Image (tube, rainbow, N blue to C red):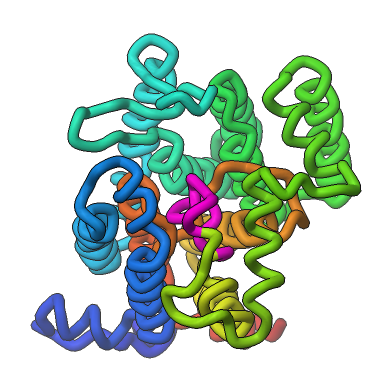
Amino acid sequence: MTEMVYGTAPIRAGEPVLPRWWRTVDKWTLSCILMLFGLGLLLGLAASPPLAAKNGLDAFHYVQRQAVFGGMGMVVMLVLSMMPPDLVRRLGVIGFFAAFVALMLLPLLGTDFGKGAVRWYSLGFASVQPSEFLKPGFIVLAAWMMAAAQEVNGPPGRTMSFAIAMIVVAFLALQPDFGQAALVLFGWGVIWFVAGAPFLLLVGMAGGVVFMGVVAYQNSEHFARRIDGFLSPEIDPRTQIGYATNAIQEGGFFGVGVGEGQVKWSLPDAHTDFIIAVAAEEYGLVLVVGIIALYCTIVLRSLFRLMRERDTFIRLAGTGLACVFGVQALINMGVAVKLLPAKGMTLPFVSYGGSSLIAAGITVGMLLALTRTRPQGEIGDLLRRKGV
């Protein structure tokens, strides 16, 4: 009777957790993540020694820290990927509220590290950026609310999640951190679209984003400076964008050679926001295309697996997590080639940064948990039985 309702169940009685996880997890996605982390360490070996020398540290100080934080991210990812969806949902909601409280306290307890935006807590030995941890939690919370809204007598999940999104965006804009604010709003829009939002409302939302951008441009010197730099037809060669675009051009198809790149000596953020410029200069277009292919594989495989998922919450949350992960990578690389305004956003699993690496592990760990093969069968089984 169970199989008639839910389809063939790939569950074996008494099967241990690890074998069951290995049999049901998406191994292609897992492999791509591990390769990205390995490439991040490889590029860190090239990009971080100049900064370490400038700060009077051991040549591989930042690479060692990246390995430690990345290892923590990998452990978190693997643990989360073994959890059932209901536990992922609970942890995501709890994590969101914890990160949101930390976000609200930033103006009182946070620091800007001289970068003009109060986004971090300084712990002495490390720093924490709450917005990185807030994103996956928000996606899970919004998906849960919108899934509940589709139930009979369910709550107004779309309205409630939109109100929370606006509050989060407002706090992020006050830092200011317009890049993370845009990602949060984008993630909510993707979930809303998959949940069945009318097209006209999506157009209205896009218009609202443009209006908010105009207001931010008129009232934020930080935002206006970045937009003006993006719109300028000329690139100042002494800026980070100038150094990055020049390095990408110099790299060509096969790069100038391992360790021969020069951009890492000029860019203060070569190991974080502009790591792709180091990859392009030393290894050329070949490696950059390979990195893009890895991100595309993660996102597309996750979306294809989620298309067959029958549980509404899993489908919404997984789609939101996959799209936010992919768009963050797109924004980082788009900024390096001046296709997008400067955002100060890391390349997931590749850039240096403790908060970024661990938060990426949380995001993808949840995604792996939600895209595992499940005993309820696929949505196509149900549609065929109903004659759709």
Q: Position of residue 300 (x, y in %)?
A: 59, 77
- Camera sees residue 314: yes
- Classified by dominant secondary structure, the portion drawn in magenta counts as loop
Q: Position of residue 47 (x, y in %)?
A: 42, 61
Q: In this view, does 102 lie above or below 308?
A: above
Q: In this view, does 314 lie above or below 387?
A: above
The one of 77 and 25 positioned closer to us in this rendering: 77
Q: Position of residue 234 (x, y in %)?
A: 86, 48
Name the residue: 59% across, 75% down: 292
Q: Is residue 226 above or below residue 300?
A: above
Q: What stretch is highlighted in magenta?
A: 264-277
The reply to whether the magenta stretch includes residue 333 is no
Q: Quadrant of the N terminus?
A: bottom left
- Camera sees residue 375: no
236 sits left or right of 141 in the view: right
314 sits left or right of 164 in the view: left
Q: In this view, does 328 lie above or below 117?
A: below
Name the residue: 50% across, 28% down: 115
Q: Quadrant of the C terminus?
A: bottom right
The one of 376 and 39 positioned closer to us in this rendering: 39
